[in-house]
Amino acid sequence: MPENYRLRGNRVSPLPLSQIKVVAENFAKAFDFKRRNRRNLDKNFELLYQLRVTLEVVDDKDWIFLTKGHCDPSKAIICVPQSIYNNACIGEQEALAVMLHELGHLFLGHRSLMHYSDKPAEEIEDAEWQADMFAEIILSIMGYETKQLSFDFYG
């Protein structure tokens, strides 16, 4: 682990990869994200409404493409542009990675907790790293190759 880790997102409660893996595997099982189910994922995403999660799909012409998606865990709202949602529903890997990344913020319980600390930040405290790992684990469960993915700007 680098001595001076630079956070890419909010500093959150530390979660080691082993804990993220448990959450991601449980999510994948509960929402039926598996190798045999890589198409027509809209029905999987619709299950989120049962948990009172709001998935806002914004018309591409109205989306400001500074990020590919956004999650507000405090309000259980995920916003993505229409093209990301449509492509994720048909199993396109990069779009699915965006959706799963945003879901990771929610299901990992991200809250900005540590605005100031005397101790340098660590990777396991980075909300973006945690959400990236959540997405990668589920993509792997689904049979996608994830080593080449870049999760930059998934906010």
Image: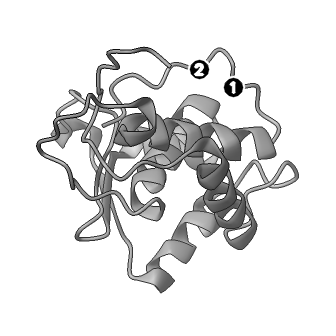
Name the foreground residue: 106 vs 95: 106
Q: Is mark 1 on a helix, strand or loop?
A: loop
Residue at image mark 2: 149
Q: Where is residue 12 in the image (x, y as percent from the top left)?
A: 31, 49
**Is 154 above or below relative to 113?**
above
**Is 52 above or below relative to 11?**
below
Q: Where is residue 139 in the image (x, y as percent from the top left)?
A: 69, 40
**Is 76 above or below relative to 84?**
below
Please give the name of the residue rendered at 64% of the width and 64% of the height, measured from the top-left corner.
27
At label 2, counting other C-alpha atoms closer than 10 Å, the crowd grade (few under 14, some 14-19, many 20 or more) is few
Q: Is mark 2 on a helix, strand or loop?
A: loop
Q: In this view, does 5 lie to the left or right of 117?
A: right
Name the foreground residue: 121 vs 91: 121
What residue type is disc 1 on? Thr
| Quarter of the picture holding the C terminus | top left
Q: Position of residue 32 (x, y in %)?
A: 74, 65
What residue type is disc 2 on? Leu
Q: Is residue 98 left or right of residue 30?
A: left
Quarter of the figure with residue 88: top right
Q: CA gap, disc 2 to disc 1?
A: 5 Å
Residue at image mark 1: 146
Is residue 91 shown to the viewer in this render?
A: no
Name the foreground residue: 118 vs 80: 118
Please give the name of the residue rendered at 17% of the width and 41% of the height, measured from the top-left corner.
62
